[in-house]
Amino acid sequence: WMIVRLSAKHAGHLDLWRRLLPAGALFTILYGLFLPAPSRQVLFLDVGQGAATLFQDGDHSVLVDTGKRPFSSRLLPQLLNEAALPLDALVLSHPDDDHDRWAERILRDAPPASLLFPRRFVSRYGPLTVLAERLGVAVVPLEAGMEFSAGAWRFTVLHPGPGPCPSDNACSLVLSVRGGGRTVLLMGDAERATDPAVLKNVQKASKEGAKL
């Protein structure tokens, strides 16, 4: 299935940018509105603590995790600089402040088209799910074997599957992401030594060109 982007990088959506930026920053808003769409790229954003990875292809963008450091001074400027908002999808690897601290802020201020996270964390992400559905954001629980895409990027869920996990970290989302002849492997906080099935899938992805 394809994630369909909700386009909002035009003058008719200045209200979004006014909510995100300080008053008087209209020049910054207008500059961002007319930036050319970025080429296909993957950026490991500087969020100080935790992880946040941005995948872009033209007008399509997917953010995997949000990091923990202050939203306004770390994550937001980078997303605006890359003309990434609103996102096709916000993907959360697991419930951990280092990875999902700003999920609610993004949902409220710049709702993405979709919110995705491991199916086993449906109850843990209950409040986020309620908020997302109220805002018209599609909620998609993930498990091993599922795939989704944005532009030329193809995301394959390697873990977690339906089996038991000893901890939240061990149940962390593991993604193999392919695009433009490149493969990126994202493991969240998955504990590599605890699940032979994860190791098998990771080794397979690595042999096919994964870059850590």
Image (cartoon, grey):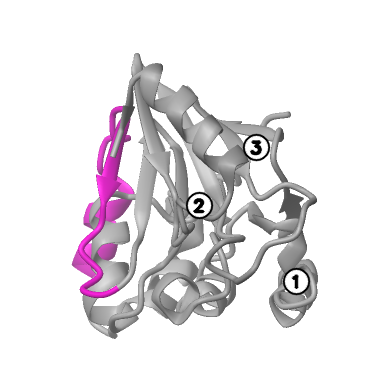
Tell me the amino acid under the disc marked 3.
Val
Proximity of marks 2 and 1: CB atoms separated by less than 8 Å:
no
Nearer-the-camera pick, 140 or 39: 140
Decide which of tag 2 and tag 1 comes sooner along the chain: 2
Q: Quadrant of residue 36?
A: top left
Q: Secondary structure at mark 1?
A: helix
Asked whether, in this view, residue 83 is left or right of residue 19, the answer is left
Residue on which disc 1 sits: 129
Find the magenta span and give its range.
Answer: 26-49
129 in relation to 89, above or below: below
74 in relation to 33, above or below: below
Closer to the eye: label 1 or 3: 1
* Magenta span includes 111: no
Proximity of marks 3 and 2: CB atoms separated by less than 8 Å:
no
Quarter the C terminus occupies: top left
99 in relation to 194, above or below: below
Measuring 75% from the left and 71% from the top, which residue is drawn there? 129
Residue on which disc 3 sits: 4
Decide which of tag 1 and tag 3 comes sooner along the chain: 3
Q: Position of residue 153 (x, y in %)?
A: 47, 28
Residue on which disc 2 sits: 87
Measuring 54% from the left and 31% from the top, which residue is drawn there? 201
Q: Secondary structure at mark 3?
A: loop
Asked whether, in this view, residue 112 is left or right of residue 139, the answer is left
Inter-mark Cα distance, 1 to 3? 19 Å
Q: Position of residue 114 (x, y in %)?
A: 66, 53
Inter-mark Cα distance, 2 to 1? 17 Å
Tell me the amino acid under the disc marked 2.
Leu
Residue 159 visible in the displayed image: yes
* Magenta span includes 37: yes
Decide which of tag 3 and tag 2 comes sooner along the chain: 3
